[in-house]
Image (cartoon, rainbow, N blue to C red):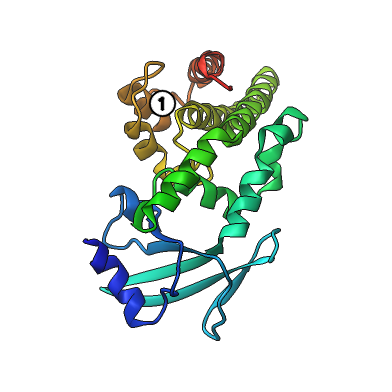
């Protein structure tokens, strides 16, 4: 799709405000991962909040405390447009500043899912308008502590899940240990990808695509997919698989660069 193919449905419905600072496609369509059933998601950044009776408010812990959303159907697709204020973007970036991070505060815990998703999508969006604004925002995100924040969170989750799995395995609860090992593996892969700037750990459905998007020395895609799909898991004797997973998780955690 050309830029006009994306923008014309917005213009026809008067959904592209005059003076918009930026407009960009986010989600699977921005990365070429979409399919026939995928929605189209677009973010529009403005300096002032517009009014419309058809827009739905999404609560966010920002000032103002709402992001407005508009939904319509075109080209046999559901389109969702979210309107962000530039001041809201600035507030989210402030939540993951190095000052906050160095205070020992879990900065990403201050972000809601909607906020974290918005920041993570800056890296992979498809600019339609305001490319300079998008590039500057990517620079500011790269200079923030966002990457370190999400990596530290994922590594913490790895540690928790590994401890759970070890305790459950020692107690003979192999079913629970299996699930905990799977959780540890997912968090370890997320930490590995986040360290390379591939964010979006909340959306595990895209983990294989995110893995393919970056070159990995720690683990090949074939090995990753073998473990993700539990191909070598033996229900009659799950201990070897669990131990293999936990050892790999600890190895990955040691390789991941947090800074």
Between 27 and 123, the one nearer to me in the picture:
123
Q: Quadrant of residue 14?
A: bottom left
Q: Nearer the viewer, residue 173 or 75?
A: 75
Residue 1 is left or right of residue 220, and the answer is left
The 10 Å Cα crowd at callout 1, few under 14, some 14 to 19, many 20 or more, is some
- Which residue is at a point 37% across and 82% down the rendered structure image? 13
Residue at 68%, 66% in the rendered image: 64
| Residue for point 53% across, 40% down | 141
Q: Is residue 106 left or right of residue 208?
A: right
Name the residue rendered at 70%, 62% in the picture: 63
Position of 37 relative to 132 (above/below): below
Q: Nearer the viewer, residue 41 or 233?
A: 41
Residue 65 point in image, percent of width and height: 69, 65
Of all residues, the one furthest to the left in this rendering is 2
Q: Is residue 112 visible?
A: no
Which quarter of the figure is the N terminus placed in? bottom left
Query: Where is residue 256 drawn, in percent x and y?
Result: 52, 19
Residue 217 appears in the figure:
yes
Which image quarter is the C terminus in?
top right
Front residue of 183/149: it is 149
Circle 1 — which element? helix
Residue labelled with disc 1: 227
Q: How many marks?
A: 1
Q: In the rendered view, tell whether residue 62 sits above or below residue 109.
A: below
Horizontal and vertical percent position of residue 16 = 41, 73
Q: Quadrant of residue 36?
A: bottom left
């Amino acid at each position: 799709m050309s830029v006009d193919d994306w923008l014309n449905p917005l213009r026809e419905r008067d959904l592209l405000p005059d003076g918009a600072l930026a407009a960009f496609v986010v989600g699977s369509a921005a990365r070429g991962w979409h399919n026939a059933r995928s929605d189209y998601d677009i973010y529009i950044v403005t300096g002032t909040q517009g009014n419309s009776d058809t827009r739905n408010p999404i609560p966010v812990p920002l000032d103002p405390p709402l992001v407005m959303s508009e939904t319509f159907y075109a080209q046999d697709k559901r389109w969702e447009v979210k309107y962000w204020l530039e001041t809201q973007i600035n507030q989210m970036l402030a939540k993951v500043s190095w000052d906050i991070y160095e205070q020992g505060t879990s900065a990403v815990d201050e972000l809601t899912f909607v906020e974290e998703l918005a920041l993570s999508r800056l890296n992979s969006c498809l600019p339609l308008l305001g490319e300079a604004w998008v590039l500057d925002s990517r620079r500011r995100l790269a200079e923030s502590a966002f990457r370190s924040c999400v990596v530290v969170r994922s590594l913490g989750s790895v540690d928790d899940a590994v401890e759970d799995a070890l305790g459950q395995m020692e107690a003979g609860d192999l079913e629970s240990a299996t699930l905990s090992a799977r959780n540890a593996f997912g968090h370890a892969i997320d930490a590995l990808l986040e360290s390379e700037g591939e964010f979006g750990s909340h959306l595990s459905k895209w983990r294989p695509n995110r893995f393919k998007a970056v070159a990995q020395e720690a683990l090949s895609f074939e090995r990753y997919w073998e473990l993700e799909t539990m191909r070598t898991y033996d229900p009659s004797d799950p201990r070897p698989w669990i131990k293999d997973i936990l050892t790999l998780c600890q190895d990955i955690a040691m390789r991941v660069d947090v800074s």
